[in-house]
Image (cartoon, rainbow, N blue to C red):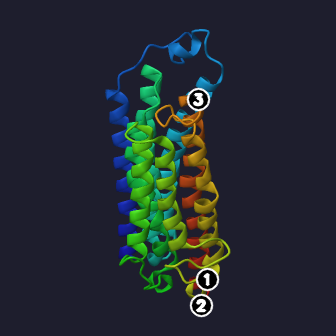
Amino acid sequence: MINQKFSKTSSLLIVATFALAMASTVSAAAVGEMGETGLPAFLEDGTNDGLETLTFFLFFVGYIAMGAAFVFFMSERSNVAPQYRTTMTISALIVGIAAFHYYYMRGVYADFGVVSVEYRYMDWIITVPLMALKFPSLVGKGAITDTKFAGLGFTGICFTGALIMVGFGYAGEAGLMNGMAALILGGMGWAMIIVATGTPWTSGLGVDNSKIAPELIWSTNALRWFIVVGWVIYPIGYLFSPGADILDGNQEAMAVAYNIADIINKIGFGVVAWMGAKKATEALASK
């Protein structure tokens, strides 16, 4: 009972802190020039082809959706068994961190009409490794194998893969190296994460399906679907990056793809983990 009360209090404190932080950033933010409809002026200057409006809309939706997901995951943290609360905390951290960065990306776009590469990668360098941590926190340490590759275990492979993927992605978009070469090298990091976590059809190098509780199999495979298929949207967006110089650069097309991918994958990752945690909690209660 004491632990449950402490958990609820902790959740409320974190939610309150997040809300206050967001309120302070709103009050401190500079407001760009606005048009007659309340949208940024550059969206009403007659050159807007609709893609710019969609980009601004998705930045705003991403910011609100991530913030709402943060509150939901933290409020649900006390409704799952103690061993699954870490995965709920990680889910909340992923969308909470993303909400902050989406707020600032929206502000940069509204004020200057520029899609920020820097804020995007600040978000990804934190949240992508956290997404990989969802597996051990959900399936349990017993399902994580001791198999190593190049001296790295499951966590090491996932973290290294995430750093490779995000690091080369930024290098390509920032013009620090050839865009196509960066895309290929970044894809190797993605492949490392898939090898470690597995696919919807196979166990991974670091995950043993036979040791995963039956009620968690669906959620585990759903997480794999997000990594194997959902993450495909990111390289599609990368192709339109002006800095990567692969296709005709279009920052709005890039942002739309990235924003849709983030909303689907980050919130979806948390939702399926929550569903698995709820099922596992119900199974434990019935024993």
Distance from label 3 to label 1 (Cα)?
A: 53 Å
Horizontally, residue 131 falls left or right of residue 216, namely left
* Marker count (numbered): 3
Helix or strand or loop: what does disc 1 sit on?
Answer: helix
**Which circle marks residue 287 in the picture?**
2
- Asked if one can make out residue 215 in the rendered structure from this viewpoint, the answer is yes
Amino acid type, mark 3: Asp
- Whether 253 is drawn above or below 35: the answer is below
- Whether 76 is drawn above or below 257: the answer is below
Helix or strand or loop: what does disc 2 sit on?
Answer: loop
- Whether 209 is drawn above or below 133: the answer is below
Image position, residue 88 (x, y; %): 47, 65
Verify CB contact (< 8 Å) between mark 3 and mark 1.
no
Residue depth check, mark 3 versus mark 1: number of the one nearer the observer: 3
Horizontally, residue 262 falls left or right of residue 221, namely left
Horizontally, residue 107 falls left or right of residue 214, namely left
Which of pointers 3 and 2 lies earlier in the amino acid sequence? 3
What residue did someone put label 1 on? 283
Image position, residue 109 (x, y; %): 46, 26
Amino acid type, mark 2: Lys
What residue did someone put label 3 on? 248
